[in-house]
Image (cartoon, rainbow, N blue to C red):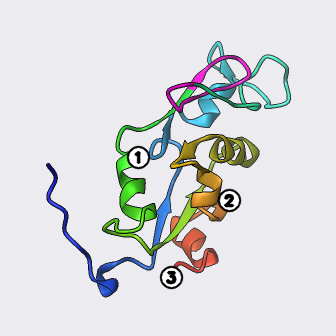
Amino acid sequence: SRLRVRATRRDIPRCVAFDLDGLLWRPSLAQLGVANDLALHCSWPNTGGPPFTRISDNSLRDRRGERVALFEGVHEALEELVIPGGRWYGAKLAVASCCQEPAWAKACLKAFRFNGRSLSEILPLQHFARGSKRLHLRLQHCE
């Protein structure tokens, strides 16, 4: 059994921001648009990307059938952040990503589920742009 430590209100961070590719899920969404080592434009018919379909293990398949899966610790982290009584429950939750295809990322966030809700509902503060994560967080009002 896990030892649970209760955080006091002042111990809870104001905001927890997640990057997407390589932190929440794998592979990088940019890899879904790659065929024969060439990056293809997302509107070309044989590339990956939306629509994303949820499969039984709560992973996704893109339109080419490539699997996108949450990393192993994501569910445990979300339990601590989202479920009342969790160690970090009450912190603002955000996404800050420099992904090349924000529409693909938003589609994945809508398709992935946790505790009956989409990740886009759970992570309501979302900022997709090139540049510093610190700037992302300022724009998200996390600082």
- Which one is earlier in the sequence, the residue at label 1 or at label 3? 1
Q: Residue at x 55, y 65 (%)?
A: 94
Q: Nearer the viewer, residue 116 or 111?
A: 116
Q: In x, y percent, where is residue 128?
A: 67, 58
Q: Report how far apart the C-alphas of labels 2 and 1 lie in the structure.
A: 26 Å
Mark seen at residue 121? none
Q: Secondary structure at mark 3?
A: loop
**Disc 2 marks which amino acid?**
Ala
Q: Is residue 4 above or below residue 74?
A: below
**Disc 1 marks which amino acid?**
His
Q: In x, y percent, where is residue 134?
A: 51, 71
State if disc 3 and disc 1 touch (CB < 8 Å): no
Side of 107 where 109 appears, left or right: left
Q: Report how far apart the C-alphas of labels 1 and 3 lie in the structure.
A: 25 Å
Q: Is residue 37 magenta?
A: no
Q: Which residue is mark 2?
A: 129
Q: Which residue is mark 1?
A: 75
Q: Nearer the viewer, mark 1 or mark 3?
A: 1
Q: Is residue 2 above or below residue 68?
A: below
Q: Nearer the viewer, residue 139 or 83?
A: 83
Q: Which residues are magenta?
A: 56-67
Q: Is residue 2 above or below residue 131?
A: above
Q: Main secondary structure of the magenta part?
A: loop
